Image (spheres, rainbow, N blue to C red):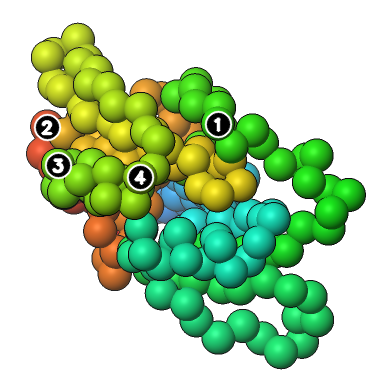
């Protein structure tokens, strides 16, 4: 009788073990499937969030300026700033000109006489006002160039909280649009909670960018195409 009971216990244990061996792979497969689905769902959500904020690759193409005299403005941008006059599409049936250099274009459009009132004051210089800025490697040479062409300018030097100095020259083009020449690359670009990534085109000169790991350039916060 005792032997029969022992055999019965062994039989029951064997059946239990057999059932476990049958059920265990199924449970593992089910749990793996659920986890994989959850990971895919999370990746899809993150991907959708990134896609929501993502924009196509972009760079500044040109700056357009109304001008009182296209010829006078061409002379200024070519002789003073070193831009090059380029061909303009013939489909543009209005007086104007295209110039290009340093990876950016200047598009000039002849203003109508009644639009002269829309142009800024040619004698007004205020660094806090609207302007475009060009990086310069030799500020002394640029300042001398302005003197040679008898162009009125404002000069100043500012320092950040770390003592990094930035030299600036402000002056107007013939129609009063302000231009800044600076050595702003003395100051690193440090992202401040931007949703996207800084994109640095490889075919153009780029300013220094501080990354999360403290390096310059790279791929952590600056995205290279």
Report the Cα–Cα distance between label 4 and label 1.
Answer: 13 Å
- Mark 2, residues whose alpha carbon is within 10 Å: few (<14), some, or many (≥20)? few
Where does label 4 land, which residue? 150
Report the Cα–Cα distance between label 4 and label 2.
Answer: 44 Å
Q: Of callouts 4 and 3, which one flags the residue occurring earlier in the amino acid sequence?
A: 3
Q: Of callouts 1 and 3, which one flags the residue occurring earlier in the amino acid sequence?
A: 1
Place of residue 214 in the rendered image (x, y in percent of width and height, measured from the top left) = 12, 32
The residue sitting at 88% across, 49% down in the picture is: 114
Instruction: Name the quarter where the C terminus is drawn.
Output: bottom left
Instruction: Report the front residue among 26 and 99.
Output: 99
Q: Of callouts 2 and 3, which one flags the residue occurring earlier in the amino acid sequence?
A: 3
- Foreground mark, 1 or 2? 1
- Foreground mark, 2 or 3? 3
Q: In the rendered view, does 106 fall on the left or right side of 205?
A: right
The residue sitting at 27% across, 38% down in the picture is: 182
Mark 4 and 3 residues: CB-CB less than 8 Å, in contact?
Answer: no
């Amino acid at each position: 009788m005792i032997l029969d009971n022992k055999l019965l216990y062994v039989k029951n244990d064997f059946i239990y073990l057999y059932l476990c061996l049958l059920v265990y792979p199924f449970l593992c497969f089910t749990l793996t499937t659920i986890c994989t689905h959850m990971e895919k769902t999370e990746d899809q959500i993150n991907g959708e969030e990134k896609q929501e904020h993502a924009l196509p690759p972009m760079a500044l193409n040109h700056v357009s300026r109304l001008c009182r005299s296209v010829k006078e403005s061409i002379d200024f941008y070519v002789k003073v700033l070193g831009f090059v006059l380029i061909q303009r599409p013939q489909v543009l049936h209005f007086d104007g000109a295209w110039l290009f250099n340093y990876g950016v274009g200047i598009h000039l459009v002849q203003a109508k006489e009644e639009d002269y009132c829309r142009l800024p004051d040619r004698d007004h210089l205020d660094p806090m006002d609207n302007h475009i800025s060009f990086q310069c490697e030799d500020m002394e040479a640029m300042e001398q160039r302005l003197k040679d062409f008898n162009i009125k300018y404002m000069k100043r030097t500012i320092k950040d909280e770390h003592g990094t100095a930035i030299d600036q020259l402000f002056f107007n083009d013939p129609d009063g649009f302000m231009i800044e020449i600076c050595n702003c690359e003395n100051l690193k670009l440090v992202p401040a909670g931007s949703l996207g990534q800084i994109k640095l085109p490889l075919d153009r000169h780029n300013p220094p960018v501080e990354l999360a790991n403290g390096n310059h350039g790279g791929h952590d916060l600056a995205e290279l195409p």
